[in-house]
Structure formats: structure tokens, C-alpha cells
Amino acid sequence: MINYCKTCGKKLRYLNTIQCRECYLQSRKANISKTFCAVCGKEFQCRPSRINKQERICCSKECSSILRNKRTTRECAHCGKKFTGLYAEVQRGGAKYCCKECYYADNRIEKVCPICKKPFIVSKSLSNRTYCSVPCKGIGQRRGNKTLLAAIRSTSRYYEWRKKVYEKYLFRCAECGAKITNKKRPHAHHIISLANLLTQYNINTLEQALYDERIWDIDNGILYCKQCHILHHSNLKLKMWLPGWPRWLGWLEIDL
């Protein structure tokens, strides 16, 4: 199959082309129009598409740099104070505020978390945000089927208490003395269980638990590795790991 130029009828080398190179260059020259530079007023040539989109309003890089660094007088959208802004930012729709305080005052709102009752600030683009943090979001989304114990363990204060227990025992298991690693996950255990503390101090809501310092006593916490924690809750008297056995036979209950 032979392809020909649609302008001059010349035989083309490639099948996916419409015009030869000479006709293509002539068509580009025919479509060039003239306009005036926005800085120096000099007349220059440019394609009409770039003039209509205002992509080319300067005749050279020097004039473009001058226009980009040019400052114009603006009025603050929040306080009404006059200030100078860059011409390039004005063209992009920016330079609306005189300072960061005015920008924050006009684009941020204050809300109150329905879980912890703490005020927090969000931007207007995130005005549909309801909770102040991820733990509060988890409590609010699953509040209908979540117990008080699970709600307490989802709060940021519980994470802080757990971290302090880790640091108190220097990331070593209090039972076997093993260094906590990725394979031996740290488990912060309550010496007096959290359920007994809630019953003892008559705590029925999450707000009461968050502000009661007796719940967050560091001396009531002890650090176990995962295996020792399992042994503690299953009342095993001796732990034994048999090499080569299947993992589901790894822990045995042996009465001495």
C-alpha cells in the first residue's frame, strides 16, 4: 500500500503520516499570528492556540522573568488590608491573603470530637471530618457493638500507658527475660485486670476512664512476651518447646 501527501500528492515514506515535511512546515508558518509583548510592547509571532490560552504573552525569557517577578497591589480577602503579590500567583488565582493568620482564619474551622469532647481544627476541605483522631474514629464507628474495655484499649491514652510499660521493663519479658523482637511481640499485661479496676472504682463510661488516674498506674503493668502471656492466662505450670515438633504441639502442660 502506498501513501501520498494530501497537499502536494508526493509519495510518503511512512503509512501513518498525512503530509510531507515541507507541506507540514508551510502549514505551521501559515497558522502563525502576531501579538505584542506584555512587558516591552515588542511585536512577536506565536501560534494562535497559545495566544488564546494565554500561554505566551511575552516575547522572550527575559521579559517573562520580569513579568513573573512583578508585584501587584491586592486586597486581603479576610481583613481587607492591602498588600503586594506576585503577578504569576495572581494569574493562577492565588495571592488572596496578606498573611498565614488570615488564610487560616478564612479556611479553617473548629469542631468538637463527640467521643473525647476535645476541640480540634480542620480545614474547610475536610469539614465532613467528625473525630479528632483514629482511635476516636474507631470507637465512634463501632460504638454500637463495642464494649467499654475494647473502647478503652482503642484510645491514645491506652497506647501511651502501654508504651511506658515497655520502657519501664526495657523491652524485656518480666517472666523469661527475653529481649522483645519481631518474633516475640511485647504484651503489656495488667496485674489487676482492667475489668476489675472498672468494677472497683465504679467506672461506667469512657469519659470517666480517660480522666481517672488510678486506671493508668504504671506500677499495675507488667511486660510479657507473647508466649509467656499465653502461659499466664492459660495457667500453665511449665513451658517446654520441643524442637522439630509441629508448632501446634509446641506448648505442653506438664504438672510437676
Image: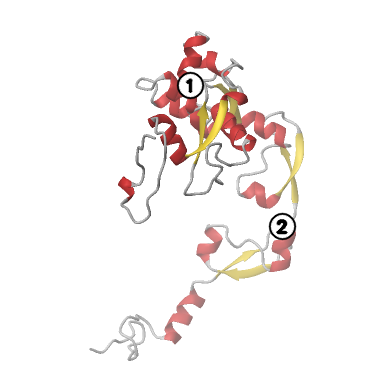
Of residues 243 and 108, which is closer to you in this image?
243
Depth check, mark 2 against mark 1: the one in front is 1
Residue behind mark 2? 67
Q: Give the quadrant of the N terminus.
A: bottom left
Q: How is the image coloured?
A: secondary structure
Which x, y percent locates residue 115?
A: 50, 20
Q: In the rendering, which numbered label is found on residue 193?
A: 1
Of mark 2 and mark 1, the one earlier in the sequence is: 2
Q: Nearer the viewer, residue 215 or 91?
A: 215
| Amino acid found under the numbered disc labelled 1 | Ser
Q: Residue at x 50, y 63 (%)?
A: 49
Q: CA distance from mark 2 to mark 1?
A: 70 Å
Eyeballing the image, is 79 above or below 16? above
Number of numbered discs overlaid on the protein picture: 2
Q: Amino acid at mark 2?
A: Leu
Which image quadrant is residue 161 in? top right
Q: Is residue 133 visible?
A: yes
Describe the element under mark 2 as helix, strand or loop: helix
Q: Quadrant of the C terminus?
A: top left
CA neighbours of label 1 inside 10 A, class few (<14), some (14 to 19), many (20+): few
